[in-house]
Image: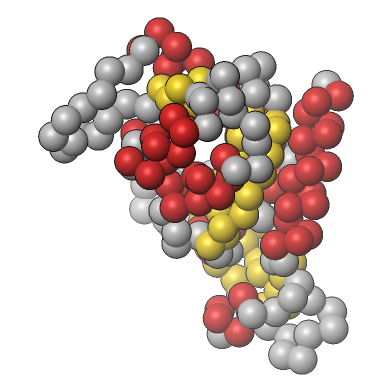
Amino acid sequence: MKQALLEDTVIHADETTVQVLKEDGKAAASESRMWVYASGEGSKKPIRIFEYQPDRSGKRPAKFLKDFGLHAVVDGLGNPVEFLLSAGNDHDSVHAVELLKKVRIGGSAVLADRAYGARTIREYISAHGASYVIPPQSNVSDPWPVDWHLYKERHLVECFFQKIKWFRRIATRYDKSDASFLAFVYLASIAILLL
C-alpha cells in the first residue's frame, strides 16, 4: 500500500497529537504523534496510512517519503547559489561534479566534507582553477593537506540547510514531484535571502 501511495502524483502528509495510556517509557499525560499520509483528491486509489511516532520531528515524514535528496552550493556568505535533486539512495558525491558544472568555481576554494574527497571531484575542481578544502577519509593511503582553519567555514552550507528547514513544506517533503519540491526550495531560498 505504501508503494502505491508513493507512486501517486500528490501526497498529503500531516500529524496530530495523540495520548497513549500506559506507553513504555512515557508518562500517561505526555503527547505522541499520529502521522497521516493520504493520496491526492484525484487519485484512482484512495489511500490513507497512519503511522504512530513518539514526536513531531520532520525526520518522520522525510524517512517515509525518502525518494530524493537535495544538494546545494552556497557562496562565502552562506547564500544559496545552485541546487540539484537526486535519487534518495544515491551517494552525495555521485552528483558533485554535475552540480559544480552549474557554477563558476575558478579562483575560489571549494569546501566539502570527507564524502566528497573522491579523485574525480578533486581533479575537476583543480582543472577549473579552484582549490579544494576537503579532508581525506581515514582509509586514504596518500592523504592530501587540508587548511583546517578555512575548513571551519564549511558550516555555512549546514546553516543554510538548517534555515531552509524552517519551511515545514521542505523539512517534511510534502511535495511528491521533484519539480514542485525544487520550486518551493527556490521560493524558500528567496525568502531566506530577503531576511
The image shows residue 43, relative to residue 68, as above or below, that is: below
Q: Residue at x 52, y 32 (%)?
A: 128
Can see residue 61?
Answer: yes
Q: Nearer the viewer, residue 187 or 82?
A: 82
Quarter of the figure with the N terminus = bottom right
Question: Residue 122 lies in what quarter of the image?
Answer: top left
- Horizontally, residue 53 falls left or right of residue 136, namely right
Colouring style: secondary structure
Where residue 54 appears, as percent x and y from the top left, is 50, 51
Q: How many marks?
A: 0
Question: Residue 189 lies in what quarter of the image?
Answer: top right
Q: Residue furthest top?
A: 149
Can see residue 32?
Answer: no
Q: Residue at x 32, y 26 (%)?
A: 135
- Horizontally, residue 128 falls left or right of residue 152, namely right
Where residue 15 appears, as percent x and y from the top left, is 67, 57
Q: Nearer the viewer, residue 87 or 130?
A: 130
Q: Residue at x 43, y 25 (%)?
A: 132
Quarter of the figure with the C terminus = top right
Where residue 2 appears, as percent x and y from the top left, is 56, 79
Where residue 95 appears, as percent x and y from the top left, is 50, 51
Q: Nearer the viewer, residue 6 or 27?
A: 6
Q: Residue at x 64, y 80 (%)?
A: 7
The image shows residue 165, relative to residue 11, as above or below, that is: above
